[in-house]
Amino acid sequence: MANSIKIRAKIKDNTTEVKCLITHPMETGLRKDSKTGQLIPAHFINEVMADVGGKSVMNAQWSGGISKNPYLSFSFTGAAKGDEVKITWADNQGGGDSETATIS
Amino acid sequence: MMMNIKRRVFLKGSLAAGTVGVAVGAGLLAPQAVIAAWNEKAFQAKSIDDALAAALGGSSSTASDAIKIKAPDIAENGAVVPVSVAAEMAGVESIVLLAEGNNAPLLATFTLGAGAAPDISTRIKMGKTSDVIAVVKAGGKLHSARKSVKVTIGGCGG
């Protein structure tokens, strides 16, 4: 599951804005397969963590109510140009990925 | 005989250790996930009060003008509704997003760390026309705001 995350991190006036896109089906477990009529098992990201320099800046818990291929943006202060932002996600089926981006 | 028993025990032990190792490797037991377990009770709650009580430890919140929810008035596709929440208050600890009309109303909780601004954007699914509710926990108190979004095609069923 490499490269499932795209991150843009830009600093402006001491505030860093991070935008990220994660590739994930985000199945709620309530949808039916149109061909077989079977329920599609729940498969969604339930945790997203953002670290800067080893410190957590944001920790999100999600349900299947977040859209497919989730988009997330948040901002924080206290970082400098060149610092690395690390985004990690984990889903309810044991999958996960992480990616780092340099603040520009 | 003794040897055999020990060997069994040893095998069992190493097998168990192996499974844990594999689980960690596969991200099943990401170290962070162990510390902050996913709040299953809150996310499966069917009512907003239950969800808030499980997620934030209280369901009574005061309406606040300082919380701004940016969402479309009419969402053509309920599967992708862009939502932004910004709170103009100090000491925000967490932001919780709910969709009143969904089966399980709690969508997401965001816990903010040091330096994080109370300003979050994401995209949510909405089953039907209802209010999007943002609850912000600041200084131990809950503040909330809501915005009605009209959904023309639901995004939760299929």
Image (tube, coloured by chain):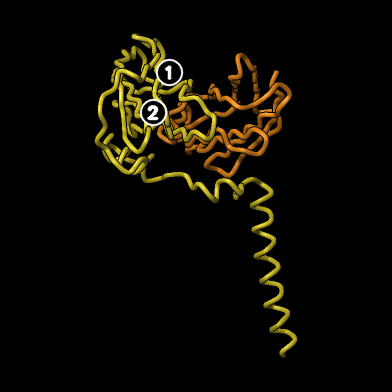
Chain colours: A orange, B yellow
> Is residue A34 shown above or below A95?
above
Q: Residues within 10 Å of mark 1 (few under 14, many from 20)?
A: some
* Residue A31 visible in image: no
* Residue A21 visible in image: yes
- In this rendered view, identify the residue nearer to me: A61 or B20: A61
Instruction: Identify the chain of the residue marked 1, using the numbered disc in the image.
Output: B
For the N terminus of chain B, give its image quadrant: bottom right
Identified at 35% across, 9% down, the residue is: B74
Q: Position of residue A44 (x, y in %)?
A: 51, 35
Q: Residues within 10 Å of mark 2 (few under 14, many from 20)?
A: many
B94 lies left or right of B10: left
Identified at 38% across, 10% down, the residue is: B72
The kind of residue on which mark 1 rests is Val
In which quadrant of the rendered view does residue B152 lie? Answer: top left
The kind of residue on which mark 2 rests is Leu
Q: Which residue is mark 1?
A: B83
Q: Position of residue B115 (x, y in %)?
A: 54, 29
- In this rendered view, identify the residue nearer to me: B149 or B64: B64
Q: Decide: marks 1, 2 in contact (CB < 8 A)? A: yes
> Is residue B72 shown above or below B155?
above
Identified at 49% across, 47% down, the residue is: B37
Instruction: Identify the chain of the residue marked 2, using the numbered disc in the image.
Output: B
Q: Which residue is mark 2?
A: B97
